[in-house]
Image (cartoon, rainbow, N blue to C red):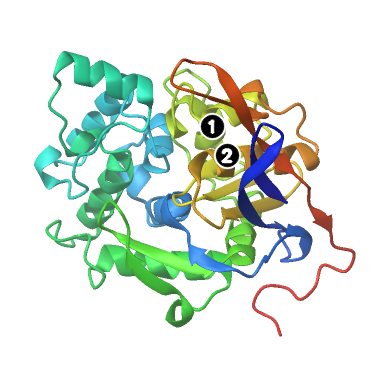
Amino acid sequence: MRVEQVRGGVVEAVHEVHAAVVDARGRLVARTGDPDLVTFWRSAAKPFQALPLVEDGVTDRFGFTSEELALVCASHSSEAGQVARVRELLGKIGCGERDLLCGPHAPLSERVAQDYATRGLRLTAVYSNCSGKHAGMLALARHHGWPTEFYTRPEHPVQQRCLREVARWTDVPAAEIRTATDGCGVVCFGIPLRAMALGYARLAIADFGLRIADSKGAGPIRNPQSAIVQSMLRHPELIAGDGRPCTDMMRAHPARLIVKVGAEGVYCAVLPRDGLGVAIKVADGHAVASALAMAAVLEQLGLRPRPVSLGARPMVNTRGEAVGELRVNGGLEQQKDGGPRTGEE
């Protein structure tokens, strides 16, 4: 599978796609390119960085709503409502914006970024797409009595706790996980695509029996799905935002899909009803190509149709004229025997 940039009938650029589709037993169901490619999980790891909040009782102690838990897992668009919820979460745990170490950046949504620039809004750390994750890490520190200062450092107990959780869900020993610093300052994890997909597949069968409130009156979250999965399924508008690929794909298939963008061409997904996890990497990190590739992979796995915005993408010139397109060519290779399970020789 690859994403081609076509102009005048000529393929002028190619974005190679690597992907792994894995079931909860670790069996490789389908692939394209190298399913064992090691790359950094980046923001697609956020649901697993949020899991300690559930397992350690942080969400119960501070009374997290399902919306707040979804934002901890999100790469949000800095929309006003999203930012307001992060501020509310910080207030619950006795922290403020100054405690956030993620730093500010322009909103990931072009529409929101343009609106804020027009209004001259001063962006602070709470506007970072990772502010929910960082608020969750501060909550974890508060709960355990760990210092909130320098919580982003690799040696801090918060980062060590997240590392152990990633190792547990992916079957990659902590000592073998490559670590570096993510764009928001916390630790990021380098693991094979197959291991990323395994972690997501396991979310489909996870159950922590968490009881958290839903402001829409849906009642407490119980079996059979995990609190993480249910919170993300209920609130696709918080996982990314209006017009963003993750939200568009989830809205197209309500309650059937969670999609989470990483960075540099990484996307992951879980199909809870099918018990499948998906991880893809566009080799050159092209963001648009990776979104188109993920939509195509999900369509091949039975989630049809793909959102119109994620089909062939027209390329326009400075006059707004269509002069070519980005399109996906090829598909997944089905695996009959599945190959070795993750963690096995």
> Which mark, residue 175?
none
Local packing at callout 1 (Cα closer than 10 Å; few below 14, some 14-19, many 20+) is many
> Which residue is found at the position 69% from the left and 81% from the top?
344
Q: Quadrant of residue 202?
A: bottom right
Closest to the observer, 288 or 109: 288
Compared with 117, 213 (above or below) is: below
> Which residue is found at the position 17% from the left and 50% from the top?
101
Is 73 left or right of 192, judged from the image as shown? left
Question: Identity of the amino acid at label 2?
Answer: Ala
> Which residue is found at the position 30% from the left and 53% from the top?
183
Is 284 left or right of 238, judged from the image as shown? right
- Assess whether mark 2 and mark 1 are in contact (beta carbons under 8 angstroms): yes
Residue 26 image point, x, y percent: 71, 66
Local packing at callout 2 (Cα closer than 10 Å; few below 14, some 14-19, many 20+) is many
Residue 114 image point, x, y percent: 29, 20
Q: Is residue 221 visible?
A: no
Compared with 290, 23 (above or below) is: below
Quickly name the residue at label 2: 291
Quickly name the residue at label 1: 245
Closest to the observer, 80 or 166: 80
Closest to the observer, 248 or 220: 248
Residue 303 image point, x, y percent: 75, 34
Label 1 vs 2, first from the N-terminus: 1
